[in-house]
Image (tube, grey):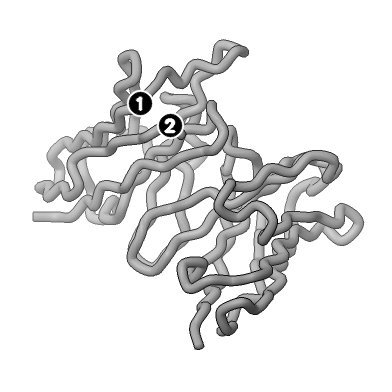
Amino acid sequence: EVQLVESGGGLVQPGGSLRLSCAASGFTFSNYWMSWVRQAPGKGLEWVANIKLDGSEMYSMDSMKGRFTISRDNAKNSLYLQMNSLRAEDTAVYYCTRGSAWGADYWGQGTLVTVSS
Amino acid sequence: DVVMTQSPLSLPVTLGQPASISCRSSQSLVYSDGNTYLIWFQQRPGQSPRRLIYKVSNRDSGVPDRFSGSASGTDFTLTISRVEAEDVGVYYCMQGTHWPPTFGGGTKVEIK
């Protein structure tokens, strides 16, 4: 059974940093692109970033470039999102998903990031 | 960016009756490989999104066959042939053909 379990969310002050993790199981992690998608409270879905099978290519939304970095460790079956210079508008539930925007077939339960002073 | 316009915003339906959700893209979603990367997601209250349909009309494993997807040019439709109580939630379309991927604003399906 495919499982994606996010962790690392929490309350952080504006300008602060957080590192989200996603532990994957039930499939061969290194065979899939992986992605992050977020959802602000009561709002719709927004793509954040995705990363190629071997981590050699990464793509992120313009509004997050330079602040958010996606990475992966295939030996640990884990996906990460390093978030720096956080703003109030980054407050959201962050979901880990399997696949690129062509797939996104499995989603984790999400981890809530709250940016507030 | 490609704009995905969903309608209606809210869809009250009677149990057992059909329901249709529309999603219009601001440009063609046909990729250079000939595929159209249009996905439909369901998000039940308090849950994560779940993929229902990929590449316009391919139903995911475990998705009831009352769900179907279709397209006409840049107009895409998700149809529920007979709505059941478990279908309540918000439905999103998403295009993955062009970077960045973009979502429709969502359609909330509720029971009358």
Label 1 lies in what chain?
B
Question: Of the residues shown, which amino acid type is indicated by label 1?
Answer: Ser
- Left or right of B38, for residue B111: left
Question: Of the residues shown, which amino acid type is indicated by label 2?
Answer: Val
Vertical placement of B55 versus B8: above or below?
Answer: above
- The residue beneath circle 1 is B26
Residue in the image at 75% along x and 48% along y: A27
Front-most of A70 and A29?
A: A70
- Left or right of B75, for residue A40: right
Mark linked to residue B2:
2
* Crowdedness near tag 1: few (<14), some (14–19) or many (≥20) residues, C-alpha within 10 Å: few
Helix or strand or loop: what does disc 2 sit on? loop
Vertical placement of B89 versus A17: above or below?
Answer: above
* Crowdedness near tag 2: few (<14), some (14–19) or many (≥20) residues, C-alpha within 10 Å: some
- Left or right of B100, for residue B40: left
Asked whether residue A1 appears in the rendered view, the answer is no
Residue in the image at 31% along x and 48% along y: B106
Front-most of A72 and A1?
A: A72
In the image, residue A116 lies at what x, y percent? 49, 83
In the image, residue A33 lies at what x, y percent? 72, 41
Q: Tag 2 or tag 1, which sits nearer the N-term?
A: 2
- In the image as oriented, which residue stretches furthest toward the right? A75
How many numbered tags mark residues here? 2
Task: Tell whether label 2 touches label 1 (CB within 8 Å).
Answer: yes
Helix or strand or loop: what does disc 1 sit on? loop
Label 2 lies in what chain?
B
Vertical placement of A113 versus A31: above or below?
Answer: below
